[in-house]
Image (tube, grey):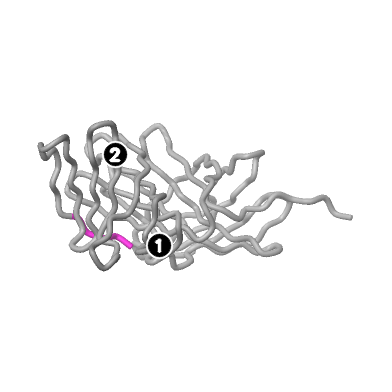
């Protein structure tokens, strides 16, 4: 009997010394692997992520190594990389750069597996100064939920903050946004129109319109 190999399935996250981030969402079925990659670099000014979580990674697995091809959201296609499982870590190594367009992807990157609830939905939005990831751990993005994750990146210096919160609903129980607390500071992400409001008591620290990126 062949030895049992570890699975590539799951969400893998990494951050390098320059505060660039790489996220892979992978599904392995037998020797095949599909998924998406999302690379954020240059202080949030370059965001190369799949539209609407449409797969942009495809490959095959052999002996805990996946050989994948990937396409950039900036137009370049047919890049190649290897993904190697090393214990609880995953190592990305680009072996061929994408062609026929612009792309943003790292040459080397180390990632770790994130514990994401099944069915969780993540959306990405950006203001003039911040790049935000909001994840509804209850399922569909507009489902009322007491377990919502906020990851914010300040574009000027790549400072990050991670907070847990809950959705906000109107009188008809429609989700209108999400709210997160950091001590006495409240972060509110509005969904429509999208925006970020940060308050300390009655003082408004941040009030910026945003745009959805996926």
Q: Main secondary structure of the magenta part?
A: loop
Q: Nearer the viewer, residue 178 or 28?
A: 178
Horizontal side of 208 relative to 84 (left or right) equals left
- Judge the density around disc 1: few (<14), some (14-19), many (≥20) Cα neighbours within 10 Å: many
Highlighted range, magenta: 210-214
Task: Give me the residue at 26% from left, 56% from top.
Answer: 177
Quarter-of-image position of residue 195: bottom left
Q: Does residue 102 show up magenta in the picture?
A: no
Q: Position of residue 140 (x, y in %)?
A: 42, 64
Task: Give me the residue at 44% from left, 68% from top.
Answer: 54
Residue 178 - label: none
Q: Which residue is mark 2?
A: 181
Circle 2 or circle 1, nearest the eye: 2
Inter-mark Cα distance, 2 to 1? 30 Å
SS at circle 1: loop
**Mark before the other along the chain sequence, 2 or 1:** 1
Q: Nearer the viewer, residue 44 or 211?
A: 211
SS at circle 2: strand
Residue at the outermost right position: 1
Q: Does residue 211 show up magenta in the picture?
A: yes
Q: Position of residue 178 (x, y in %)?
A: 29, 52
Task: Give me the residue at 59% from left, 49% from top.
Answer: 83
Task: Give me the residue at 41% from left, 54% from top.
Answer: 38
> Is 141 drawn above or below residue 155 in the view shown?
below
Residue at the outermost front position: 171
Quarter-of-image position of residue 170: bottom left
Q: Which residue is mark 1?
A: 50
Horizontal side of 84 relative to 99 (left or right) equals right
Q: Nearer the viewer, residue 151 or 184?
A: 184
Q: Position of residue 88 (x, y in %)?
A: 63, 39
């Amino acid at each position: 009997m062949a030895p049992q190999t570890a699975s590539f399935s799951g969400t893998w996250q990494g951050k390098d010394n320059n505060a660039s981030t790489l996220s892979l969402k992978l599904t392995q079925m037998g020797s095949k692997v599909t998924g998406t990659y999302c690379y954020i670099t240059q202080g949030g000014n370059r965001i190369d992520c799949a539209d609407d979580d449409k797969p942009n990674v495809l490959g095959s697995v052999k002996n805990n190594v996946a050989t994948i091809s990937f396409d950039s959201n900036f137009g370049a296609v047919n890049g190649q990389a290897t993904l190697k499982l090393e214990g609880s870590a995953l190592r990305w190594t680009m072996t061929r750069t994408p062609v026929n367009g612009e792309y943003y992807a790292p040459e080397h990157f180390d990632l770790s597996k994130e514990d994401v609830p099944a069915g969780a939905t993540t959306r990405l939005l950006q203001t003039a100064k911040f790049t935000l990831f909001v994840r509804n751990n209850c399922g569909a993005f507009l489902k009322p939920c007491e377990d919502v994750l906020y990851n914010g990146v300040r574009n000027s210096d790549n400072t990050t903050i991670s907070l847990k919160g809950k959705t906000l609903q109107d009188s008809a129980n429609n989700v209108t946004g999400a709210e997160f607390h950091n001590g006495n500071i409240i972060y509110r992400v509005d969904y429509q129109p999208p925006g970020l409001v940060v308050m300390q008591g009655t003082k408004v620290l941040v009030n910026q319109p945003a745009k959805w990126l996926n």
